Image (spheres, rainbow, N blue to C red):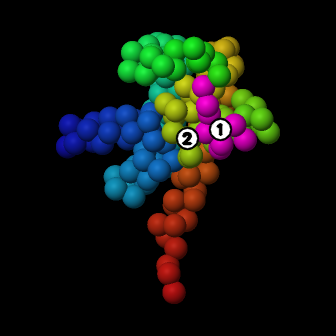
Amino acid sequence: MILHSLYQIVMVFLLSGFKFGFGGVPLAEFVYKFPFFKLITVTTAGGVTGAILFAYISEWVLDTWHKFRMRKFPQHEHHERKHAPESKLVKKIREKWGLYGIAFFTPFILSIPIGTLIAVHFYHDKQKVISYMIVSIVGWDFFFYFFYNYLAHFHWH
């Protein structure tokens, strides 16, 4: 029984570090039926750990991706990484709301790894990025808990 519970906690924790709002929280809510405190604690811990981890490996990931692109597509070598095209969504979020917007949309649209990587790429202060991500993750965790809890008890007529 303890191993089964530990397995559930580890799965929710890991999934929360990658796909928070549509992964870790629903898994904890609907599949494993975690009580409120356990759900908030495990999913927040997973999301925050993911944000910290991806903030610190983001430079390596970006450099590795850049080297891979230069090896596979040498004709684009004259383009610097700073001028790489960004998606319309990310550009709109960054221009309109800055780091606040990226952190806000990360847990439910961008995913923790992608959102953190984008945030660190544009705003080089990792501590600031992590702080914003933590606030966003905690806020969205409460929202998702109550939203999914409401859906679970909503009776379709």
Does the magenta run of residues contain 21?
A: no
Residue 90: which disc? Answer: 1
Sequence-earlier tag: 1 or 2: 1
Q: Mark 2 and mark 1 in contact (Cβ < 8 Å)?
A: yes
Counting from the top left corner in percent of width and height, residue 79 is at 59, 18
At x 67% / y 28%, what residue is drawn?
132
For residue 90, say whether it is visible. Answer: yes
The number of numbered badges drawn on the structure is: 2
Q: CA distance from mark 1 to mark 2?
A: 9 Å
Q: Quadrant of residue 141?
A: top right
Q: Residue furthest bottom?
A: 157
Does the magenta run of residues contain 85?
A: yes
Q: Amino acid at mark 2?
A: Leu
As displayed, is residue 3 above or below residue 65? below
76 with respect to 99 (left or right): left
Q: Amino acid at mark 1?
A: Val
Q: Residue furthest front?
A: 75
Q: Badge 2, how many Cα within 10 Å: few under 14, some, many 20+?
A: many
| Badge nearest the viewer, 1 or 2 | 1
Q: Nearer the viewer, residue 76 or 112?
A: 76
Counting from the top left corner in percent of width and height, residue 122 is at 67, 22
Counting from the top left corner in percent of width and height, residue 155 is at 49, 79
Residue 110: which disc? Answer: 2
90 with respect to 1 (left or right): right
77 with respect to 80 (left or right): left
For residue 139, say whether it is visible. Answer: no
Where are the magenta residues, as a range?
Answer: 84-92
